[in-house]
Image (cartoon, rainbow, N blue to C red):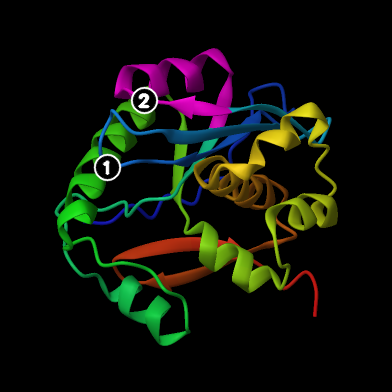
Amino acid sequence: MGATNSTTASQSDGKLGRVSGLDLSAESYNCSGYAVIDPQAVRLTRLECLYSDEQIVSAILADSVVLVSIDAPLVEVPRFREVDRVAIGKGFRVMSPTFKHMRKLTERAWKLYKELLIAGVQVIETHPRSALKSSGVSDVVSLASTIGVDLGQLGSRLVRKDLADALVAAIVALCYLKGDCIDFIEASDGIIYILKKLRA
């Protein structure tokens, strides 16, 4: 069973909550890139490596995040999904959850997905490389500029691919929340959120 939750994320007072992107690693000893965007200030507020599941969940809750966009397949049992087939057919290079390291990643992602849902945090699936491709923008710094996200001093950390991918994932979450720059690849067993064409 895949994750297809599409309820709009918001805080109870009607204000936009913080959104985050997570470039999840298959193993907890490797960096999982984590980025947080404040949608009201349209500003990147956190960009760093996280490691254990406990550290990831604690950070998300401490940052008052209402929506997390994860770069990992959200499916309970690792398998090649119809949504993966559709994505590949559209020219996006997603990897099958059945590959060895992807299997570990998928199992870890599903565990986090369940923990975060219980905590009241919405979780969606994305694929940063595909999101960047669908946007028509060449790199993450240009993408942030096009969307209007202020990177501040944290922008210097984007030389790390896992942090750059986390920021793309966070921008996908921001666009999902705003609704005007989000796109998706959909099948009966899942949805992968990407970005609308932002630049020709």
Work out which quarter of the rendered image holds the N terminus and state it: bottom left
Residue drawn at x 85%, y 47% is 148
Taking 168 as reference, is 121 above or below it? Answer: above
Q: Is 129 left, or right, of 46 in this rendering?
A: left
Classify 10 Å Cα crowding around label 2: few (below 14), some (14-19), many (20 and above): some
* Location of residue 111 by image quarter: top left
Q: Quadrant of the C terminus?
A: bottom right
Residue extending furthest toward the bottom: 89
Callout 1: few (<14), some (14-19), or many (20+) C-alpha neighbours within 10 Å?
A: many
Residue 12: image x %, image y %? 64, 23
Give the Cα separation between the discs numbered 2 and 1: 10 Å
Determine which of the numbered discs, if any, sits on residue 60 in the image. Answer: none
Residue 81: % across, % down: 24, 70
108 vs 145, left or right, is left
Q: Nearer the viewer, residue 126 or 11?
A: 126
Mark 2 or mark 1: whose residue is earlier in sequence: 1
**Secondary structure under badge 2?**
loop
What stretch of residues is rendered in magenta? 48-66
Choose top left, top right, bottom left or bottom right for residue 24: top left
Residue type at mark 1: give it.
Ala
Q: Secondary structure at mark 1?
A: loop
The x and y percentages for residue 149 are 80, 42
Residue at the spot of label 2: 51
